[in-house]
Image: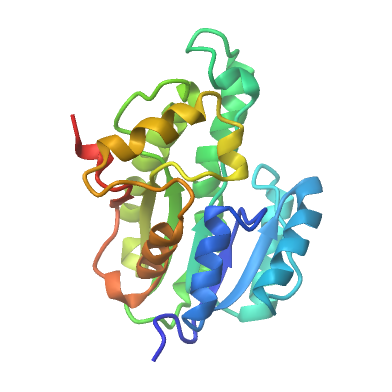
Amino acid sequence: MALLSDHRILVTGVLTDDSLAFGIAKRALEEGATLALSGFGRGTSITRRTAKQLGDVGEVIELDVTDPAQIDAAVLEIESRFGRLDGLVHAIGYAPASCLGSGMFVAPFEDVSVAMHASTYSLAALVGAFRPLLQKSTALGGASVVALDFDGSRAYPMYDWMGVMKAALESLGRYLAREVGPDKIRVNMLAAGPIRTMAAKSIPGFALFEETWGDRAPLGWDVRDASAVADAGVALLSPLLRGTTASVIHVDGGAHAMG
């Protein structure tokens, strides 16, 4: 039996076919999942075109995670399609340009708050809104929430306020896991090494990660290959890791642990 047979999963943040969310969605389909995808704003049309490469995933849901009305509408849409939710992938992050590459003293609080709302608070907003559907999961071990992360334990060059958002995301994941664990909902963060995606191109100095990450990682690292990240995402969504929650799972060749 496939790992995700009879699993109903919502994957957010699928934009182009080089995105980590696309890789997870593709692998989830291969493992028998039934998927819904969400897009945001003008990018929703791109998500719809990308979704065609995945086959039958239904109409893409427009979901601005900073808009409570759109979150509520997405919950109603998923309820009408699936009746329940066995998995939720949070692959959403955004920060104004001032928050990246300029140090910690340039971005005004208004920009930092935008980054916090979209990149971190949105996880709590989605888990809270979809909680009733996640509680209905019929999967062995219950439902799984996977939030895409980038190691929040260190200060990386040029990453600036987004690094703070990722550290906050990891902390938030632990608190959410504590709160929804009794509902048989687990919450984990998947901290991937740098992958050459459209989102990565918006990070100033990303080339520095490309040049040095593979040298630091004991297993090596290929910024063009996201397959290990996708496989880990599927494992977290599946019953295989049903006893794992509140954890940061690193898929980065081991670089995060090196001096």
Question: Which residue is painted at 37% across and 34% down in the image?
Answer: 167
Residue 85 screen position, x and y as percent: 53, 73
Rendered view: 197 above or below 231: above
Question: Which residue is painted at 52% across and 54% down in the image?
Answer: 20
Q: Is residue 221 in view from this perspective?
A: yes
Residue 81 screen position, x and y as percent: 68, 79
17 with respect to 250 (left or right):
right
Please state which of residues 111 and 151 is positioned toward the viewer in this rendering: 151
Residue found at the far top of this picture: 105
Question: Which residue is painted at 71% across and 62% down in the image?
Answer: 50
* Residue 119, image quadrant: top right
Q: Is residue 131 in view from this perspective?
A: no
Residue 103 screen position, x and y as percent: 49, 12
Residue 177 screen position, x and y as percent: 34, 55
Please state which of residues 220 and 238 is positioned toward the viewer in this rendering: 220
62 with respect to 217 (left or right):
right
Q: State the quadrant of the C terminus.
A: top left
Q: State the quadrant of the N terminus.
A: bottom left
Rendered view: 236 above or below 93: below
